[in-house]
Amino acid sequence: MKHKKINEVKTIFNRISCSYDFLNSLLSLGLHKYWKNQLVNLLNPINGENWADLCCGTGDLSFLIFKKVWPNGSVTGIDSAKEILNIAKERSKLFGNKFICWEMQDIFEIDENLKIYDGICMSYGLRNLFNVEEGLKKVFNLLSDRGRAGFLDFNHSKCNSLADIFQKIYLRFVVVPVSKIFNLSKEYSYIEKSIKNFPDGNKLMLIARGVGFKKVEYRTIFFNQMGILILQK
Ligand SMILES: C[S@@+](CC[C@H](N)C(=O)[O-])C[C@H]1O[C@@H](n2cnc3c(N)ncnc32)[C@H](O)[C@@H]1O
């Protein structure tokens, strides 16, 4: 089950890698950049800190964190899908940024004895992991004492709430048809299923506390469509 999901997710992101940034910007009308900025502002990375962007994809958060921790800190972007990570590397070259370290790795295989971060961020990654609790445990173990972490993802709204109905209409009648033009409708149909299986904010906070995080906060943004989870050890 675990390996099936890991391979399924890797295949999806390798396949959509070329259109990923374009479709993200188109389908969110560019708002995903704003939401990512919001997450980074809440986390407040500071110069000299060492950060990891897990499930970094094409590296949006890594570039934002870089601006805050540079020149004395570090940023590592980690993703298991080769093709999407290659785009992050290409963007780095384009921006003349030799500073961010890109690693192709499954986050569950990161050696916790070798890597300790002051902060960890993740956007639209947690929902794609085979197990959210295992993902949060991994993040907990990779953080230094009092380290902090932040996650941006779709919010799992209450069934049949206005936000839930809007989300389903948007996914079914905008996201899937638009992705169909790019021959990626199967891959983008996966989003609705993944949100259904993703814990809601209260459950996420409960899981995070169970894992050991002392400070736990969840807030929704953009009319309850997205959620930001902020954690501290
Ligand atoms: C929806 S994309 C998000 C990319 C980027 N963070 C963003 O916000 O645009 C999810 C990413 O998680 C990566 N991913 C999923 N499971 C992973 C795992 N176990 N280890 C590392 N990366 C993983 C996928 O390859 C994909 O690039």
Image (cartoon, rainbow, N blue to C red):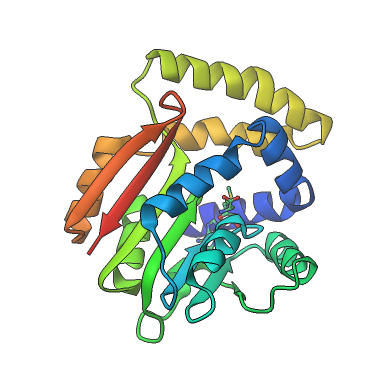
Residue 28: give x, y in percent of width and height.
63, 32
- Number of marks in picture: 0
Quadrant in which residue 94 is drawn: bottom right
Please state, as top left, top right, bottom left or bottom right, where the C terminus lies in the image: bottom left
Within the displayed image, which quadrant is ligand 1 positioned in?
A: bottom right
Residue 115: give x, y in percent of width and height.
41, 81
Residue 154: give x, y in percent of width and height.
47, 36
Q: Is residue 19 left or right of residue 195?
A: right
In this view, 106 is above or below 227: below
The residue nearer to you, when weighing 87 against 99, is 99
Residue 103: give x, y in percent of width and height.
60, 75
In this view, 67 is above or below 144: above
The residue nearer to you, when weighing 124 against 65, is 65
Which residue is found at the position 69% from the left and 35% from the top?
A: 186
Could you tell me if residue 127 is visible in this image? Answer: no
Could you tell me if residue 82 is visible in this image? Answer: yes
The residue nearer to you, when weighing 222 against 2, is 222
Which residue is found at the position 51% from the left and 60% from the top?
A: 3
Which residue is found at the position 60% from the left and 35% from the top?
A: 31
The residue nearer to you, when weighing 39 against 135, is 39
